[in-house]
Image (cartoon, rainbow, N blue to C red):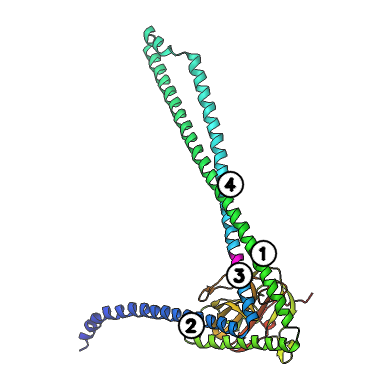
């Protein structure tokens, strides 16, 4: 019996190896399918939030549309500016090669001119005279070899000059095309800039109406309460959707207490736990910062929300391992989409004034499930109000 076991195991090994190879592939496909489902459900949540906002608060819906228009114009303008920078670099490279080719052509022409002057000095009939004079055969052979080398060198110079001239023609054509492309991009950039200014004026008109409506303290408090309830509902829905796909990669978030960096450089405007309105306190911190400042992820994780939300404007939420979340609100642009993985320090947005703010700010919050946590306990560097 004992002798038959090795043979039996040997027969089973290919099946075991095949199972070991197929199972991870099946798990990976299942995970990808699950993540696609998660993305679809989050997209449906975003659409539901937009629909609810439009039905419940027309001014908030107008503000959302205006700020999304500003963000879209800003993105398109930045893309065109990036293309212009690339085109300018390409043109500079072409111009540099053009200058090098012109210098090389001038050197080739000077060298050819020297050879032609030497040939003129020797005389056109010199080879024939050498042959007819029947001078020393050894010297005659050397002279004919010299003349042959001299002729080949001149032919090579001429070919090189022709090549340089052809390349100059190609560079002139490429430079003209790049100049035309730059001109088109400059026109597009001006068009997008005009569109951005119109979108900002539209946003300003909406803000006037919003501020007029909020002159009543009761109305303002009701608006803040709606926004708080909306965020709480969103977070609850996200927890439900993400429960089967937790983030398990990277260093444990709970071990990073006191070691994280602020997502942006700024001045403290409102602090965690401070009174915001009757019955409401700040669940995070509000930082005054420069428009367009880079907003960075505080830790590795997965983007689970990237859209406009009443009260927070353009908002990114990153899920970290252990059920922790970090929230980044009032952005001007969002650079990461739902499902994207981020590492500590990755730029995920640029700061702005979306959500109806009057100046560029960033709202930052850390949560464990539904519970907001004091960010100061997680960040190693204190903030100042000055």
Q: Earlier in the sequence, mark 2 or mark 1?
A: 2
Q: Are marks 2 and 4 in contact (CB under 8 Å)?
A: no
Q: Which mark is residue 92?
A: 4
Does label 4 or label 1 sit earlier along the sequence?
A: 4
| Residue closer to the observer: 47 or 33 | 47
Cα distance in 3D space between marks 2 and 4: 48 Å
Q: Earlier in the sequence, mark 3 or mark 2?
A: 2
Residue identifier under label 2: 41
Helix, strand or loop status at disc 1? helix
Mark 3 → mark 4, Cα distance in angstroms:
34 Å
Is 216 contained in the magenta span? no
Picture residue at 60% right of the left edge, 62% below the top: 78
Is residue 293 visible from the viewing direction of this image? Answer: no
Which residue is found at the position 29% from the left and 81% from the top? 16
The picture quadrant where one finds residue 352 is bottom right
Q: Nearer the viewer, mark 2 or mark 4?
A: 2
Residue 251: horizontal and vertical position, in percent? 55, 79
Q: Residues within 10 Å of mark 1 (few under 14, many from 20)?
A: some
| Labels 3 & 2 near each other (Cβ < 8 A) | no
Q: How far apart are labels 2 and 1 at the CA level?
A: 35 Å
Q: Which residues are magenta?
A: 70-75
Q: Nearer the viewer, residue 344 or 190?
A: 190
User: SS at mark 2?
Assistant: helix
> Disc 1 or 3, which lies upstream in sequence?
3
Residue corresponding to mark 3: 69
Quarter placement of the N terminus: bottom left
What residue sits right under mark 1 in the picture? 197
Relative height, residue 14 to residue 97 (above, below) = below
Mark 3 secondary-structure assignment: helix
Instruction: First in sequence, mark 3 or 4: give its number.
Output: 3
- Mark 3 vs mark 4, foreground winner is 3
């Amino acid at each position: 019996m004992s002798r038959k076991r090795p043979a039996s195991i040997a027969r089973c090994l290919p099946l075991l190896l095949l199972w070991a190879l197929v199972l991870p592939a099946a798990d990976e496909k299942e995970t990808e399918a699950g993540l696609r489902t998660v993305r679809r459900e989050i997209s449906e949540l975003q659409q539901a939030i937009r629909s609810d906002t439009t039905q419940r608060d027309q001014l908030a819906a107008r503000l959302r549309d205006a700020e999304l228009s500003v963000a879209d114009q800003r993105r398109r303008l930045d893309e065109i500016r990036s293309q212009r920078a690339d085109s300018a670099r390409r043109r500079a490279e072409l111009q540099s090669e053009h200058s090098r080719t012109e210098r090389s052509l001038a050197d080739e022409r000077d060298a050819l001119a020297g050879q032609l002057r030497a040939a003129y000095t020797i005389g056109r009939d010199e080879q024939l005279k050498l042959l007819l004079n029947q001078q020393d055969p050894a010297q005659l052979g050397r002279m004919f070899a010299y003349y042959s080398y001299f002729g080949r060198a001149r032919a090579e110079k001429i070919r090189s000059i022709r090549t340089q001239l052809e390349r100059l023609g190609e560079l002139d054509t490429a430079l003209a095309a790049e100049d035309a492309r730059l001109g088109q991009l400059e026109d597009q950039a001006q068009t997008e800039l005009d569109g951005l200014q119109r979108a900002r004026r539209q946003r300003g008109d909406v803000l006037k109406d919003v501020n007029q409506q909020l002159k009543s303290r009761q109305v303002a408090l009701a608006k803040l309460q709606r926004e708080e309830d909306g965020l709480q509902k969103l977070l609850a829905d996200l927890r439900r959707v993400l429960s089967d796909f937790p983030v398990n990669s990277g260093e444990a978030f709970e071990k990073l207490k006191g070691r994280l960096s602020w997502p942006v450089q700024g001045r403290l405007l409102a602090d965690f736990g401070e009174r915001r309105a009757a019955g409401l306190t700040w669940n995070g911190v509000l930082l005054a910062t420069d428009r367009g400042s880079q907003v960075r992820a505080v830790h590795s994780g997965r983007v689970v929300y990237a859209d406009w939300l009443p009260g927070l404007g353009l908002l990114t939420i990153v899920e970290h391992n252990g059920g922790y979340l970090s929230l980044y609100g009032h952005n001007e642009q969002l650079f990461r989409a739902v499902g994207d993985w981020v590492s500590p320090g990755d730029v995920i947005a640029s700061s702005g004034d979306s959500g109806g703010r009057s100046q560029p700010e960033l709202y930052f919050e850390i949560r464990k499930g539904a519970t907001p946590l004091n960010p100061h306990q997680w960040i190693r560097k204190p903030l100042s109000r000055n």
